[in-house]
């Protein structure tokens, strides 16, 4: 704990006391959100690729092309992204759209500098270049969080706890099975994000304003130099479509919807009245007024607030172009900003939540205590009655419901229910007793036995949940390998472009 003057421990926790996970994730997100409208790096990248293609196709003379390339490279190298000497490209600003050509004109003259515009429109393909990098970053965070879920789930296959439906105890489960149930929709969302990457990583460069070009351009070569997986063929589609942004945001919304629900469960289960989870100090702060407060929930609440932001970004991306003509419009340009904002948010929140979850301590004894005292195993008592006495299930259901009602009226916990109480309930429902033993009844109502017996496919038995975890881990490893391959393709494309540029400018 940090100290204040006089070496007295301070009771009010501040940011520097928090986990490094929180600090680094928050700081990175703040920096990225500040730079979210700066497409300067993608502008330089695409312009170099385009000029290389113009030279290779004989559209501009090699010597002039080399001079143009050299000027672009020097301008790119002149300063950092925040250096005022470097042009900053923001596609929504008509002034900044022309900034690169103006700076090049100052160096090599207007006639030569203007050749960067032969056969293409300026806005393309910068949104896709920047979005794909952020999709990969968000995917890294998602894959890391999925691994965290599997790790914690595997460590808690036998951590028996009450399972809830409609905020009431339903059936016994395990903490591992619960976490796996969160993992699976997130894994599906990861598949959706991968699919959106495929849609995003298509080159639109060379589309002209909408009708392509009469110059003998090679759109495939440019796509390869930029690391795109292919070319978005129809040239009007290139400037008019907005679906890749909406698809990506839909995947992100699915991520954050699942994550926000997880955070609420974690917050509730850590409450003083429940105490099923021990919450790490490094993810907690306190009240400025109330010294007893351990506000671990603040981190989880922020993630839920962020989930609303991501959904709002999806709404914005869907609404902006819906009443626009199917052509190049400002609304289509504007969609990139909510997309990039949402990607930054998701990347940050998954890192923070992964750190939180990996340090949470399940209170196994408390979990089991709550499961034993409640009636989440009641359905198994009804099953026992059907199996041993041949009574129709619905009648067995009525008997068991009466057992629960009588126990509740008499403040009898589930693990204290005995044969006389069950016989009393059966007599009220059927006019006859069942004659079950205390051992049979308490075994049926025991949550540990319930969990062990429920071993059907996908069920809560530790062996079955363990099987699912192992299977999911294999699928996750395959996803990690695909992610690594995507990054390799981009690195190889940049290396190829660098070789092309070096050759043409004689380096």
Image: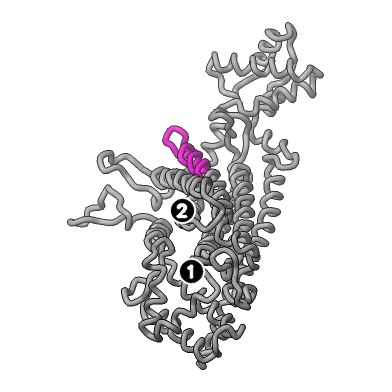
The residue drawn where x is 22% and y is 53% is 8
Q: CA distance from mark 1 to mark 2?
A: 21 Å
Q: Which residue is mark 1?
A: 122
Q: In the rendering, at what x and y percent does residue 390 appear?
A: 81, 19
Compared to 27, does 9 lie above or below? above
Q: Quadrant of the N terminus?
A: bottom left
Tag 1, which secondary structure? Answer: loop
Corner quadrant of residue 54: bottom right
Is most of the magenta stretch helix, strand or loop?
Answer: helix
Tag 2, which secondary structure? Answer: helix
The residue drawn where x is 67% and y is 10% is 424
Answer whether residue 1 is magenta in the image. Answer: no
Q: Which residue is mark 2?
A: 338
Q: Using the rendered image of the protein, determine whether residue 351 is visible from the camera's viewpoint.
A: no
Corner quadrant of residue 503: bottom right
Is residue 328 or residue 10 the one in the foreground?
Answer: 328
Q: State which tag comes first along the sequence, 1 or 2.
A: 1
**Badge 1 density bin: few <14, some 14–19, many ≥20, Cα 10 Å:** some
Q: In the rendering, at what x and y percent does residue 143 appear?
A: 58, 58
The residue drawn where x is 39% and y is 53% is 282
**Badge 2 density bin: few <14, some 14–19, many ≥20, Cα 10 Å:** many
Answer whether residue 266 is magenta in the image. Answer: yes
What's drawn in magenta, residue-wise?
Answer: 259-275
């Amino acid at each position: 704990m940090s100290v204040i003057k006089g070496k007295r421990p301070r009771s009010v926790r501040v940011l520097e006391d928090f986990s490094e996970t929180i600090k680094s994730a928050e700081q990175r997100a703040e920096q990225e959100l500040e730079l979210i409208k700066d497409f300067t790096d993608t502008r330089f990248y695409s312009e170099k690729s385009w000029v290389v293609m113009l030279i290779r196709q004989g559209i501009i003379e090699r010597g002039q092309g080399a001079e143009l390339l050299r000027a672009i490279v020097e301008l790119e190298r002149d300063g950092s992204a925040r250096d005022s000497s470097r042009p900053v490209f923001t596609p929504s600003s008509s002034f900044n759209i022309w900034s690169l050509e103006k700076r090049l004109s100052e160096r090599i003259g207007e006639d030569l500098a203007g050749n960067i515009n032969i056969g293409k429109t300026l806005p393309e393909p910068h949104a896709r270049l920047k979005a794909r990098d952020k999709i990969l970053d968000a995917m890294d965070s998602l894959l890391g969080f999925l691994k965290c879920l599997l790790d914690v789930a595997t460590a808690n296959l036998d951590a028996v706890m009450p399972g809830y439906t409609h905020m009431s105890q339903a059936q016994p489960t395990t903490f591992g099975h619960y976490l796996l149930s969160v993992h699976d929709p997130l894994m599906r969302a990861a598949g959706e994000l991968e699919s959106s990457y495929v849609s995003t990583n298509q080159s639109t460069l060379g589309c002209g304003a909408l009708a392509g070009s009469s110059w003998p351009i090679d759109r495939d070569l440019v796509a390869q130099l930029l690391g795109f997986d292919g070319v978005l063929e129809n040239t009007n589609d290139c400037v008019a479509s907005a679906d890749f942004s909406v698809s990506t945001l839909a995947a992100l919304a699915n991520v954050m919807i699942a994550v926000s629900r997880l955070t609420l469960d974690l917050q509730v289960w850590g409450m003083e009245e429940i105490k099923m989870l021990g919450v790490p100090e490094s993810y907690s702060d306190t009240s400025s007024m109330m010294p007893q407060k351990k506000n671990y929930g603040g981190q989880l609440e922020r993630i839920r607030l962020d989930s609303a932001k991501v959904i709002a970004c999806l709404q914005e991306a869907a609404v902006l172009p819906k009443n626009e003509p199917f052509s190049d419009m400002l609304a289509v340009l504007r969609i990139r900003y909510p997309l990039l904002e949402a990607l930054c948010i998701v990347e940050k929140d998954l890192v923070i939540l992964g750190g939180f979850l990996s340090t949470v301590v399940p209170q196994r004894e408390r979990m089991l205590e709550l499961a034993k005292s409640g009636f989440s195993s009641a359905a198994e008592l009804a099953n026992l009655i059907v199996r041993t006495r041949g009574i129709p299930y619905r009648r067995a259901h009525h008997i068991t419901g009466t057992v629960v009602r009588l126990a509740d009226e008499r403040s009898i916990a589930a693990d204290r229910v005995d044969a006389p109480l069950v016989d009393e309930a059966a007599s009220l429902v059927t006019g006859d007793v069942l004659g079950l033993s205390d051992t049979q009844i308490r075994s049926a109502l025991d949550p540990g036995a319930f969990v062990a017996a429920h071993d059907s496919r996908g069920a809560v038995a530790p062996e079955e949940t363990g099987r699912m975890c192992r299977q999911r881990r294999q699928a996750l490893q395959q996803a990690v390998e695909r992610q690594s391959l995507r990054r390799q393709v981009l690195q190889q494309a940049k290396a190829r472009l660098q070789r092309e540029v070096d050759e043409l400018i004689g380096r």
